[in-house]
Amino acid sequence: MTVEARRDPRSEAGKWHRESRARHFRERAIKIVLAACACVSVLTTFGIVFVLIFETIAFFREVSVVEFLTSTTWSAAFANPQFGIIVLISGTLLTSIIAIAVALPVGLLAAIFLSEYASTRLRRWLKPALEVLAGVPTIVYGYFALTFVTPFLQSTIFPSLTIFNALSAGLVMGVMIIPTIASVSEDAIYAVPRGLREGAYALGATKREVATKIVVPAALSGIVAATILGISRAIGETMIVAVAAGNLAQLTANPQEAVQTMTAFIVQVASGDTPTGSLTFNTIFAVGTTLFIMTLILNIVSYLFVRRFREIYE
Amino acid sequence: MTRSGTGIAQKGGPEQESVFKTSTAVRYALDLVFTILVFVATMIGLVVLAVLLIDIARDGVPRLSWEFLTGFPSISPERSGVYPALLGSLWLLVITAIVSVPLGVGAALYLQEYAPDTWLTRLIEVNVSNLAGVPSIIYGLLGLGIFVNLLGPITGGQSIVSGALTLALLILPVVIIATREALRAIPDSVREGGFALGATRWEVIRGHLLPMALPGALTGTILALSRAIGETAPLIVVGAATYITFVPEGPLSAYSALPIAIYDFVSRPQEAFQIAAAAGIVVLMVVLLLTNSVAIWLRNKYQRRG
Amino acid sequence: MSRGARLSLLLRTFLLALTLALAGCGGRGQEQEGDGQSQIAVEGSSTVLPITQAAAEAFNRQNSDVRITVSGAGTGDGFEAFCNVDTQISDASRPIKDEEADRCEQAGVEYIELAIAQDALTVVVNPRNDFAQNITLDELRTLWEPSAEGQVTTWNQVNLEWPDQQISLYGPGSQSGTFDFFTERVNGKEDESRTDYQASEDDNVLVQGVSGDTSALGYFGFGYFEQNQQRLKALNVDGIAPSVETTQSGEYPLSRPLFIYVNAQDLEEQPELEEFVQFYLENLDQFVEQAQYVPLSPEAAQEAGERFNNRTTGTAPEDALGAEHKGNGK
């Protein structure tokens, strides 16, 4: 096809050329629109980081960083405040670890069930049923932990459980996170190409072997993403711990005792009577920044983990 | 081609590394154990859900009535209703979905399909994941500063739009991550086939990738909206009213929301208010189920085994 | 999704953006500055919220065109919005603080402080506690002051007649008005308290805690005790039992005033605001009882009425409950 023929709008080739110009323009326009969408999430990050850092700096003008990081007492909202973030971190870690210890195995196994063992019809209603767990308002979970789970545990396995404790809160939080881990993992597992499974079956593998040794590694990226999402949700959860774990800021590794998490503290101050701009109010941002950094490290670690271990098929 | 070291078939001597144990009985026994495990795991979730729902329904369903749904909150627990809260939540839900779903899917598309694999993109990716863990009340404070105060003249201050935008920012990371993972799961052969036939990137996305990624994106949306509908703390900070004498007339109106009404009922001393709270929760769950069903129906339509 | 669905979604988003832009040119939505929309915005303490809600509900029945919103984000947030001229009335479970008063003054906001009710802080123990009937203010101080932290852990350290058993403490969080009042009244200085107790902003949670723990002692508002009398036991304070009568007469030592603050300028410019506050004060007892608080003594109620009628601005919380009232701080 000659160049002249291509440019002639009346010929077949010319029509293609003209359309291709329009396509090209549309491509660029769409790319810009999508980039703008991505920008919003970037801007949000910057917005949050900016606000956090700005107020945290104001906070550290009055409180020493050393005290913040090393002190083992937290009484920030009282007179003569003490600021030892480790106390709140221990509260968050205690409840979150219990939550993940529940949610990860249960969620992952449930995901495998939904994807590998359940029939399509069963999956169609079972998956949404599990997702309903994610929609129960967290205040309901909080009261459920306080009025049902704690008395139940007190009368059966843990008689020395205090009325506010990290264990009930952690367990119920775990249940809340199950759908996050299960559903997102399940999508990843479901999307693994059938050919892989069939190849393994053809070689004599059992269902379990296919699920654990072939499918899960193939879906690893999605599963890790689901887990990180779940952990983030646990760390950032507020209501359940505020109601059920108590608000006693103490440094402990015993889940039978009450703890205060970083989020419970934030909500206590933000919804209370503190005037904005005061030291107590700025403490919210210092705690928030710590939370942000913690989850950031978690995310970076998981990102590197996935990059290293991900199986890419075809 | 698999890149991993655990090969399925390897030629070699009798001492070759094998993924599979040779004792069949043990394998089948483990299989049985595993099957039971996965079944039990699924049941745990369902059982807890059932216990929760039955507990709430037992208290809440008898309290439900047309008056409850169309009544205004009141100092008397028997007269209290959730009408303004219900409408407020519906308004919030619609606007939040309209804002967050296109934004989230668009952002995921860009990050996964268009953006080059530079350190900047990776940084953005990690940051988006991180946003999912920020406590909702911080989003509330952010929303207060930006949407209520700074953009007050446009959004109407403490209005539905401010609340919805705050919620949209809150759930955006979930939508982005779920969509991105769904896109990642699509084999490159699909993309390459499309390009080989001369399609542009957008044509490949629209014609093939989006439909294939839609189920995963919808899962993310379902989880995200479920969270948004139950959030209390950020809405309180951003100015949702607890008691209101009128229903919202538009996106710029003052408003209340179901979780706030529930939280208010739950913190009153009278027992009758606790029952009203249970009824409010039932209403919330019904709204949630209806919203989810739409997304689930769409998901089922598009889900196809690769 | 199909092309059609995606297009319609984009279209809807675009229309929404357009609407927002147009609305922005149109007006300031719900900003209150006498813009013709008869709306009254109230923010502040969630303790006072039920009273204001009762008043708003009754008022709205007779004046259905007046729109009222009430939020309960906290006394501090309420004052913040109030000094920002975003609200006409501020609910407060404590008097305005100096910094807040300064901010209002800087913003040119003049307010009328009106006491509207009392709340009796009730000290409760588990019903199975059979040894404690009465506690003095001094004993309370021994138990709750900052130096008691980690030291005073058994009942007999508070009162020698009580047994040598562990005591577990429950109370409101340090951000609540109840805490502010209790610490000032008992420990002498606001916010000074031991910190090793189970705290919760939600009094129902505290009820749950005390009723499930035989060694518990806690304090919260009277309404929560009244509604849960089978699960709790109230202690007399300095010999006086908490009740509506003893609180109203001023005998009960732990009663605190609840306030509303009204923007004086808006009062002149918005007739419906004046009508509402008038209505509020005229039927005050009815609303206070509905909300499970204790009405003011007749003298205090009269005082509030006079402040309103004379449009007396500024803060004078000592006068709030009447000069003779015991619960009026030191």
Image (spheres, coloured by chain):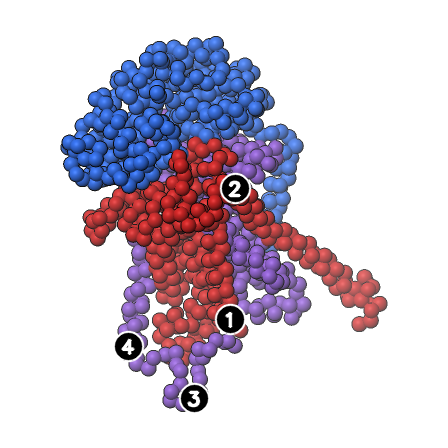
Q: Position of residue B155 (x, y in %)?
A: 58, 35
Q: Nearer the viewer, mark 3 or mark 2?
A: 2
Q: Which residue is mark 3?
A: B12
Q: Residue at x 24, y 31 (%)?
A: C124
Q: Position of residue C86 (x, y in %)?
A: 53, 27
Q: Residue at x 50, y 62 (%)?
A: A303
- Chain of the residue that carries numbered disc 1 in the rendered image: A
Whole-Å distance between the Cαs marked 4 and 2? 64 Å
Characterize the local packing of mark 3: few (<14), some (14-19) or many (20 or more) Cα atoms within 10 angstroms.
few
Which quarter of the rendered picture does the N terminus of chain C lie within? bottom right
Instruction: Check disc 1 and report its element: helix, strand or loop.
Output: loop
Residue B286 visible in the displayed image:
no
Looking at the rendered structure, the kind of residue marked 2 is Arg
Q: Which chain is purple?
A: B
Q: Nearer the viewer, mark 3 or mark 4?
A: 3
- Chain of the residue that carries numbered disc 4 in the rendered image: B
Which quarter of the rendered picture does the C terminus of chain C lie within? top left
Q: Residue at x 72, y 57 (%)?
A: A25
User: In the rendered structure, are the residues bearing label 4 and label 1 in contact, judged by CB atoms less than 8 Å apart?
Assistant: no
Q: Colour of chain C?
A: blue
Q: Quadrant of residue B262?
A: top left
Q: Earlier in the sequence, mark 2 or mark 1?
A: 2
Q: Position of residue C285 (x, y in %)?
A: 35, 16
Whole-Å distance between the Cαs marked 4 and 1? 30 Å
Q: Is residue B233 above or below residue C88?
A: below
Looking at the rendered structure, the kind of residue marked 1 is Ile
Q: Are marks 4 and 2 on the same chain?
A: no
Label annotation for residue A312: 1
Q: Which residue is mark 2?
A: A61
